[in-house]
Amino acid sequence: MANLEVVVENQVFRFITPEVLDADFIVKEAGAVRSGSLLVKQMRNPPYTILIDVGSGAITVHGSTKEILARMAVSELLLGLGLPDSGLKTEIGPVTSSCSMPFSLDLDKSVDVLSSARMESALDAIRIADMRHELEVLVFRNGRTVIIGAISHRIALRAAEYWMKRFQRLRLFNEG
């Protein structure tokens, strides 16, 4: 069976500023929108969503796959506001990846055979609680797979390969 191509779709990066941020200033000058205790800034190019927790000084970037690009987006935001971008502390969050299994999957049989799988009827998929890799795997009927919450791309790749082999061993693929 061929190797899987696992693509990182998103990784969460959080940057902590050494300074207290002024919410009203960020709303006025950067066009951020208040959402509860957070400020949301949607960037167009690159298409990232930036969440700003002004109380803690945390700036979370969604939509990036590389730390350097997420940092550049935060720097652009801060420098555009006339604030320094030095002294940022970085926290790297979970990875969301995707791949395609070589065949479609028999979802009903999979739920019966795999104790860690449950049917997600609204998605026409199964959700697997993968305790071995400490993540979740969503597998759609057509074999499209989304790996959620991996700590790295390498772990997502290992999980995808593990499940592909397991599906094959348990004859859960529709190979015809």
Image (cartoon, rainbow, N blue to C red):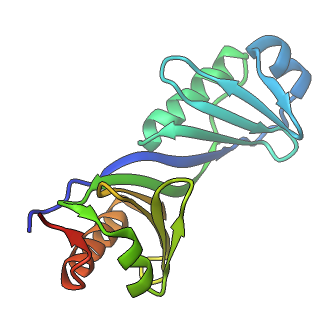
Q: Nearer the viewer, residue 71 or 86?
A: 71
Does residue 106 sit above or below 88 in this rendering?
A: below
Q: Nearer the viewer, residue 4 or 26?
A: 4
Quarter holding residue 50: top right
Q: Residue furthest top?
A: 29
Q: Can the viewer see residue 151 in this picture?
A: no
Residue 28: x %, y % from top left: 85, 13
Q: Left or right: where does residue 96 sit relative to residue 91?
A: left
Q: Position of residue 94 (x, y in %)?
A: 52, 58
Lateral position of residue 170 relative to residue 77, left or right: left
Answer with left or right where residue 135 lies relative to residue 77. left
Query: Which corner quadrant holds the C terminus?
Result: bottom left
How far across and how far down the image is residue 172, in percent? Answer: 26, 76
Would residue 94 be seen by someone viewing this image from the given angle? Answer: yes
x 79%, y 12%: residue:
29
Q: In the rendered image, which quarter is residue 167 located in?
A: bottom left
Instruction: Name which residue lies at 29% across and 64% down.
Output: 157
In the image, taking residue 38 as reference, residue 130 lies left or right, namely left
Residue 169 versus residue 31: which sits nearer the camera?
169
The percent position of residue 139, horizontal first and vertical second, equals 39, 62
